[in-house]
Amino acid sequence: MKPYDFSVELNFTRTYQKYKNEHIAIREVLCLKEMYPRIFCEIRSGDGFAGRVKMSYAGFSPEPGGLGYYCNEEAIKSELAKNEYDKKLRNDVNAMLEFWKTENTRYKVRAAYSPSVAEALPSDNWPEPGAAFPLYRMAGAYLDYEKLLCNGIRGMKNIISWKKARTAGRNQDTKLFEGMETALDLLAQCCLYYSEMASGLAAAERDPMRAGELETMARALRNIASERPETLREAIQLSWLYTILSGSLNYGRMDVYLGDFLARDLEKGTLSVSGAQELVNSYWKLMADRRTTWNGRVILGGVGRRNEKNADRFALLAMEASRAVKEAEPQLSLRFYKGIDESLMEKALAVIGEGRTYPILYNDDVNVEAVAKAFRISHEEAEQYVPFGCGEYVIDHQSFGTPSGIINLLDVLEITLHNGIEPMTGKEAGIKTGVLEQFETFEQLFAAYKRQVEYFVSALAKQEKIEYQVAGKTAPFLFLSMLYGDCLERGKGIFAGGVRYLGGTLETYGNINTANSLLAIREAVYEKKLLTLEKLVEILDKNFEGYEKERRLLLDMPKYGNDDGAADGMAVRVHEHICRAVRDQADRVGLHSYLVVMINNSANTTMGAFTAASADGRRKNEFMANANNPVGGSDKTGLTAMLNSLVKLNPAIHAGAVQNIRLSPELFRDGHAAVKSILKTYFENGGTQAMITVVNKSDLEKAMREPEKYAHIFVRVGGFSARFVELDRSVQLEILSRTQY
């Protein structure tokens, strides 16, 4: 294997060093020119569109590769260890590593922490024992693809040139717009780069049909380099390349911005329905190959679409693509509402019933109003909500929602029971809230738990604001800012005052285990007096060893997910407290919104592995419940009861939650009638969302024994889908534990 040459990384670093003190917009675009098109990959056999990328080990992006200016020291050292390199190159690479240690954006974020934030968030290396961790990323960007496609590269340059001239006339800084103009030139250059590649491949191609496809691709790339897109093919190609250069990982309301192109091509007769389907399938394969795992959202349906008829035509093709292209991405999501074209819901259930896990269903009749209240925006603005990543909500190209942080509520409870000590490490981790003897009533214990939660929440909110501030001072993120309201109007980068609504989110883990544990403590210790609190904590510290009877007692306590008033009531209390505690931080730290997201990916399993035994009967190191779903197997009174529990948690005080449901294939054999009836009732009762996996438990068990035979099985893990056989065994076991209906 040819040794990695590090040329992109070294040239990128030299350019950054040369222009370190230049205006941040100019420095950013000059650095981007060292990455693109060099990190683009070749067009592969069968590709319908150009644009694959392998991120460099040092570079710039909002999230892919790292936050802002990044350097992956571990990966670089791994490459150095694989091969022999001459002394000069090795020295140059080591000097580069040394430079980026204190110059990368992530380092600058932590360096900006106040002492109190640093004390509450001592580590970035999660998962490990601990209650709270920051995440370093600028995720959740949804670009204004309509603006891009309506104007094209030349039109966008004209808009920006006009803004620059207007700004210069007011004697204001024009460098941001100069950087944007150069960035658009770079985008055009990338189009031409791939056009030449496609033409070269066509000339060498022996298959006439494939040669024709490549020439068509080359022509489309040449066209969009200078003119606005006129066809579906051109619109897809331009939006895709822009997405790659921007570092955005989600694709927005695709049926809206591509629906008109589809309709125009079909009406002109320049594209057949089957030809359009082939294009969409090709696009799906390209997105799947990007492997964004927790991202890759394509949004269909929903209220607030300007071109519903055309959008619906594209939506049907998109769902068929997810059915035909059997991959974990893109994460196809369907927003539905009363009055939606029935053919869309029929198609959705048909695809879900085949075990594809898509589309994910979102109930606009509940969500729009909930988003309006949670985000403090108008109903009309809330109609443009879009889930991203694992299921967090933002407003399409109007709001930004995360670097985000993580809080493990179950660990917070354990720290409370140990008066500020993390039981897995024995180290101080939280605040002193009182020794066990002081908690004479359950409400005193619950109040101590809430104070502990609020301590971590306050630090995480401050961290998020710091991350935005550092990112905004470091770079304007040109490709994001050009397609984000109100950056052009304000003449500011997205994180430097440009974006209309700058918000934040906090990912919560262990919610349901915490609620179940608090209820068990209330009943076993304070109401039935079966144990003292001191004895209970002793049992937990010993991981139930020698106390199986007591563990059984705790396991038999009421559990969330059974439409039980006591259990669900405690879940509501935990939910209301964390959501309101987080929401109240927004004004304190200067964010438009700061909201909880209950979107667990697989971290309920990985974080559970670093969490002590809990009062719900869970042993040390075992997985926690996923998001706000019941603990696997604890929902014992049927599907209706479980769904009734889900709807009790108020959706108007958070920014997204995951509702995972595993159904048997048998439910779909009667034309979806049973499923439609169940979902109809659930959504009418206030259900916000449903992620449905259709697979038999027995097939999952077989897949664990003979993975080579079951690569076709996909499951919803948390906020993402995956081939079951590719998951870690611990995650497989957590999924297997979930009740099948």
Image: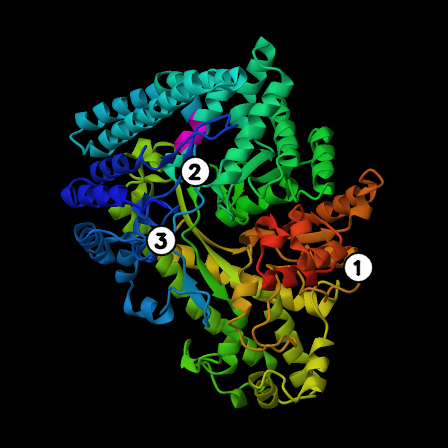
**Which numbered marker is on residue 398?**
2
Residue type for callout 1: Gly
Please state which amino acid type lies under the numbered disc 2.
Answer: Gln
Q: Disc 3 or disc 1, which is closer to the eye? A: 1
**Circle 2 — which element?**
loop
Mark 2, other Cα within 10 Å: few <14 / some 14–19 / many ≥20: many
Residue 195 is one of the magenta-drawn residues: no
Identify the residue position indicated by label 1 in the image: 638
The answer to whether the residues at label 3 and label 2 have Cβ atoms under 8 Å apart is no
User: CA separation, marks 3 and 2?
Assistant: 17 Å
Q: Earlier in the sequence, mark 1 or mark 2?
A: 2
Decide whether the magenta segment is chiefly helix, strand or loop.
helix
Answer whether residue 255 is visible to the viewer in this image: no
Horizontal and vertical percent position of residue 680? 76, 43
**Residue 585 in picture, x, y percent from top left:** 42, 59
Numbered disc 1: secondary structure: loop
Counting residues from the N terminus, which is met first, the one under dot 3 or under dot 2? 2
In screen coordinates, is 670 left or right of 34?
right
What are the residue bounds of the magenta stretch?
A: 238-242
With respect to residue 45, does 610 lie above or below? below
Is residue 198 toward the left or the right of residue 731 in the image? left
Q: Is residue 418 visible?
A: yes
Front position in the image: 451 or 391: 391
Closest to the observer, 382 or 608: 608
Q: Quadrant of residue 285?
A: top right
Mark 3 sits on what residue?
590
How far apart marks 1 and 2 lie (CA) works out to 41 Å
